[in-house]
Amino acid sequence: MNKSQQDKYEAYFTGKKVAVVGYGSQGRAHALNLRDSGYNVVVGLRPNGATWKRAEQDGFKPATVAEAVKGADLVAILCPDMAQPAVYKESVEPNLKKDAAVLFAHGFNVHYGQIAAPAGVDVVLVAPKAPGALVRRQFEEGRGVPCLVAVHQDATGNAKTAAYAYAHGLGGTKAGVIETTFAEETETDLFGEQAVLCGGVTELITAGWETLVEAGYQPEVAYFECLHELKLIVDLIYEGGFARMHEFVSETAKYGDLTRGPRIVDARTKEQMKTVLEEIRSGAFAKEWIAEDKANKPHYNQLLQKDLDHPIEKVGKELRSKMAWLQASAKEASAGQAKEDERKLAAAGSKT
Ligand code: NDP
Ligand code: MG
């Protein structure tokens, strides 16, 4: 990014008001980063909600969503995806300034037709590719996390500038901004979390751990092998791709990787991935999840409980309690994400 672009983004929100609706994982990080970037931020929340106090503790004067939206030039909708349509309909749209911008951090509701803004309003996406706690931490360390930016509706002619200026305030331009569409962001984000990041990886870990334990090996040894060490490997891949990982593991590990890996994740896995992607693209996944949420998540809660009751969780808890540095980083994170998770879990009667 050149200096004149930087100046343009830094000047864009001068004299403008940004409303951040929701103060959870993303909301807190966005509100704090934008405020530290000099933007005028108002946090909009439910008055009796758990995060109202947290916003106050961070020095904000939270307002109701309706009050926060009034007069705002940009409204960032950062409450949970399943809550957004009702919040938008009841409190955002009736109070929107006529040439305001509405911003999302994930395209779900716009892409699947759950939220449609009036014609005079800009609709943009700034999706940081990291959990909220990291969006904040990287910013505090003078860095940023990469952001995806998209424009769904450009009513004023300024939609793209507004989105870039917002990403700039988050620290995103330091790490890189990639232009995308709501469709691409939504579909790839859902696919990534289902097939690889959350769904795929936990199933891979669990299957590996079970295989060792069922064969008679100590659960603790299996835990270190199949879960704990994953971080070390992922860190290397993150820093320098497969090449860097290969540099650091032994020749024997590499030979095993190259010959056995493709037998574990094989053509059938890829076929399943294609099916999962198709469910996302057709809207079948969105429809299923919206219905599950409306029914108070019976299936979701049951599956979540099953995951949490798995013996690997018990072994992990004991082993992690001996690693002091993990306790320290968990504490640090709890200032942000973990507290919110605990609260959500308590509300759902289970844990994430
Ligand atoms: P959270 O679940 O952390 O949001 C919780 C916040 O929303 C709380 O402040 C809560 O307030 C508020 N909230 C909940 N319901 C309502 C309501 N009905 N009215 C007003 N406020 C409400 O959300 P996330 O940060 O996880 O997600 C926000 C958006 O960011 C989503 O679109 C998500 O897809 C996207 N995203 C999330 C990422 C992440 O890391 N989590 C990564 C990238 C994008 P209260 O205290 O009252 O309950
Ligand atoms: Mg799983």
Image (cartoon, helix red, strand yellow):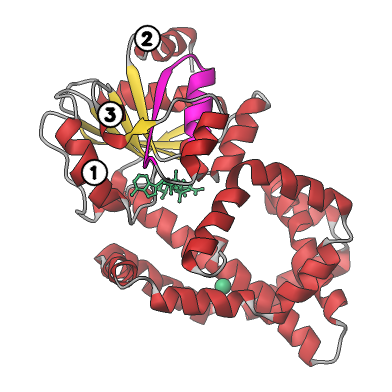
Marker count (numbered): 3
Q: Which of disc 2 and disc 3 is earlier in sequence?
A: 2
84 relative to 306 in the view: left or right: left
Mark 3 or mark 2, whichever is nearer to me: 3
Residue at image position (23%, 40%) is 91
Label 1 close to label 3 by CB (< 8 Å)? no
> Tag on residue 88?
1
> In 3D space, how far apart are the residues under numbered discs 1 and 3 (Cα atoms)?
13 Å
- How crowded pointer 3 is (Cα within 10 Å; few <14, some 14-19, many 20+) is rated as some
Where disc 3 sits, the SS reads helix
- How crowded pointer 2 is (Cα within 10 Å; few <14, some 14-19, many 20+) is rated as few
The reply to whether the magenta stretch includes residue 118 is no
Residue at image position (18%, 31%) is 95
To which residue does mark 2 refer? Answer: 14
Q: Quadrant of residue 226?
A: bottom right
To which residue does mark 3 refer? Answer: 67
Q: Is residue 38 above or below residue 207?
A: above
Residue 341 appears in the picture as rendered: yes
Image quadrant containing the C terminus: bottom right
Horizontal and vertical percent for residue 308? 62, 74
Name the amino acid type tagged 2.
Answer: Thr
Horizontal and vertical percent for residue 27? 46, 38
The reply to whether the magenta stretch includes residue 31 is yes
Name the amino acid type tagged 3.
Answer: Glu
Name the amino acid type tagged 1.
Answer: Tyr
Q: Which of disc 3 and disc 1 is earlier in sequence?
A: 3
> In 3D space, how far apart are the residues under numbered discs 2 and 1 (Cα atoms)?
26 Å
Magenta residues, start to end: 28-47
Residue at image position (41%, 79%) is 299
Q: Quadrant of ligand 2?
A: bottom right
